[in-house]
Image: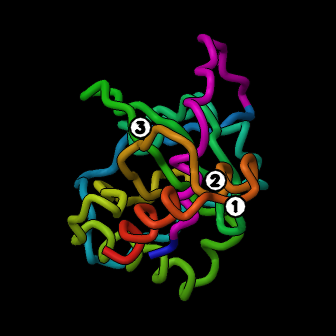
Amino acid sequence: PSREGVRRGRAGPPAAVPGPRVRDAGEHRCDPPPTGSGVESAAVPEPAHPLPAFEPLSLVGATLDGRYELVAHLATGGMGAVFRARHVHLRKDVAVKVLRPDLTSSAEIVERFRREAEIASALEHDNIVRVTDFGRCPEGYLFLVMELLAGESLFDRLRREGFLPPEEAVPILWQVCA
């Protein structure tokens, strides 16, 4: 599976969680929840209507599938954005990767995203982020729910320090190869 969301999910200290705010009429909302939950192998349903342009910051405050409130934007990549989210019923923080809406028109990309969720959810290893859910909200956004990891990414550490001495690099390489 793609490490984009994992790498970004481990980046730096947690983002500040914005305070309460009023939702504008044009903002995204993904309620009410559809039936079913969890990672499923079934085909992903088509969005109910055309999706707006993808502006990740505008999704902060939205609730996906009636369960995941997006509380902070963590990073944006080529295929979408990763958010810190809170499961509204369990009150547990998670990371949510949201696929860019323009990519959902490609059946191939949607299937690849679904397979990433299915395969990643079957993997259990200390060095692989856990995937716990996958879905499409009524607004049409495809999303992947993962454990939220704290800490600095290797990319950010290398950018900050320039290089790692062997005594620090070898333990990291052992984890990568495990």
Label 1 residue SS: loop
Which label is found at residue 171?
none
Q: Label 1 amino acid?
A: Gly
Determine which residue is flagged by label 1: 77
Give the residue pinned by disc 3: 68
| Residue 6 visible to the viewer | no
Do the CB atoms of the residues marked 3 and 2 lie less than 8 Å apart?
A: no
Q: Is residue 4 magenta?
A: yes
Query: In which quadrant of the rendered image does the N terminus lie?
Result: bottom left
Q: Residue furthest bottom?
A: 108
Up the image or down, 92 lies above or below 155; here it is above
Q: Considering the whole magenta stretch, tell me its main secondary structure.
A: loop
Cα–Cα span, label 3 and label 1: 20 Å
Single out the mark in the foreground, 3 or 2: 2
* Magenta-tinted stretch: 3-25
Q: Dot 3: within a 10 Å radius of its alpha carbon, few (fewer than 14), some, or many (20 or more) residues?
A: many
Label 2, on which residue? 81
Looking at the image, residue 88 lies above or below residue 19: below
Q: Residue at x 50, y 56 (%)?
A: 168
Q: Nearer the viewer, residue 105 or 87?
A: 87
Using residue 18 as the reference point, say whether residue 176 is left or right of it: left
The answer to whether residue 145 is left or right of residue 157 is: left
Assign a secondary structure to mark 3: strand
Image marks 2 and 1: residues in contact by CB distance under 8 Å: yes
Q: Quadrant of residue 155?
A: bottom right
Distance Cα–Cα, label 2 vs label 1:
6 Å
Q: Position of residue 161 (x, y in %)?
A: 72, 49
